[in-house]
């Protein structure tokens, strides 16, 4: 056995059997997941399915970052929480759910707002970062931190009946960044609290974030690097925009 290989017991092999049998995945892919560390920024509507699917899939370490508490209005879409979680910190509520899904996952909870230095220290050496937040200021902060640490970023957003997702893979020199897509000084701060959201929309986008994270970790398939995938729930249509690295971007030029 190679030094970096992991032996799975019979129960683990059964638990992950439907993934291990996949072409291009196999036991090697499951080993990569177990060794991975994913940082999830926000455990709300998007972060709920991300965290649940990554835990179930066998990602070894998840760090959950959120400084909010569970409110009754969250329960319509934030499926990692439940009625008994109201007034509890979101990271604590999420941890309780994830431990029931897969008790073998290492879960770290950060119940505070991080500045850029703290975030850079946190994500240093991680496998990828999931941006499941709901405001532009935080997204720009996460983008800068990921670029600084050269950590891949899986970013999504959803509002009303629409959503979008992209991958900014800063392990590769040709990757655009979030600031190539949106100017840091020109966007209105829109969120679900002000505009509403249909619950399955965040479920769809969050599930796709989990999928992109697994593809990054296991190096399978083509990620959404330099592509923006836009979802229209009412028309049930997807469209793809190509992204190019902005030569004048204030972050990644």
Image: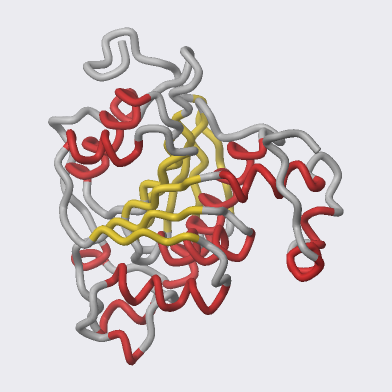
- Vertical position of residue 177 compared to residue 228: above or below: above
The answer to whether residue 78 shows anywhere in this view is yes
Q: Which quadrant of the view contains residue 150?
A: top left
Q: Nearer the viewer, residue 225 or 149?
A: 149
Q: Quadrant of the N terminus?
A: top right
Q: Nearer the viewer, residue 172 or 72?
A: 172
Q: Is residue 221 left or right of residue 42?
A: right
Q: Nearer the viewer, residue 34 or 114?
A: 34
The answer to whether residue 235 shows anywhere in this view is no
Q: Is residue 139 left or right of residue 34?
A: left
Q: Nearer the viewer, residue 162 or 121?
A: 121
Looking at the image, which residue is at 22% across and 28% down?
Answer: 183
Q: Is residue 21 left or right of residue 58?
A: right
Q: Position of residue 112 (x, y in %)?
A: 17, 57
Looking at the image, which residue is at 34% across and 31% down?
Answer: 146
The colour scheme applied to this rendered structure is secondary structure
Q: How many marks?
A: 0
Looking at the image, which residue is at 28% across and 71% down?
Answer: 90
Looking at the image, which residue is at 72% across and 40% down?
Answer: 5
Task: Determine the residue located farthest toward the bottom in the rendered image.
Answer: 84
- Vertical position of residue 96 compared to residue 190: above or below: below
Q: Position of residue 229 (x, y in %)?
A: 52, 41
- Vertical position of residue 24 compared to residue 247: above or below: below
Q: Quadrant of the C terminus?
A: top left
């Amino acid at each position: 056995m190679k030094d970096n290989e992991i032996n799975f017991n019979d129960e683990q092999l059964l638990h992950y059997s439907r993934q291990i049998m996949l072409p291009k995945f196999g036991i090697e892919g499951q080993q990569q997941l177990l060794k991975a560390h994913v940082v999830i920024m926000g455990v709300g509507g998007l972060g709920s399915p991300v965290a649940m699917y990554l835990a179930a899939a066998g990602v070894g370490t998840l760090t959950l970052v959120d400084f909010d508490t569970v409110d009754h209005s969250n329960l319509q879409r934030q499926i990692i929480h439940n009625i008994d979680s109201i007034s509890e910190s979101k990271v604590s509520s999420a941890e309780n759910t994830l431990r029931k899904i897969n008790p073998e996952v290492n879960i770290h909870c950060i119940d505070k707002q991080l500045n850029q230095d703290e975030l850079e220290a946190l994500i240093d050496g991680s496998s990828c970062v999931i941006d499941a937040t709901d405001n532009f200021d935080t997204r720009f902060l996460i983008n800068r931190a990921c670029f600084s640490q050269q950590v891949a970023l899986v970013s999504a957003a959803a509002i009303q009946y629409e959503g979008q997702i992209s991958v900014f893979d800063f392990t590769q020199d040709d990757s655009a960044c979030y600031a190539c897509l949106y100017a840091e000084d020109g966007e209105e701060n829109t969120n679900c609290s002000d505009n509403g959201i249909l619950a399955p929309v965040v479920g769809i986008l969050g599930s796709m974030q989990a999928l992109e994270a697994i593809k990054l970790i296991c190096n399978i398939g083509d990620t959404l690097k330099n592509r923006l995938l836009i979802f229209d729930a009412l028309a049930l249509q997807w469209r793809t925009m190509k992204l190019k690295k902005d030569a004048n971007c204030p972050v990644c030029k």
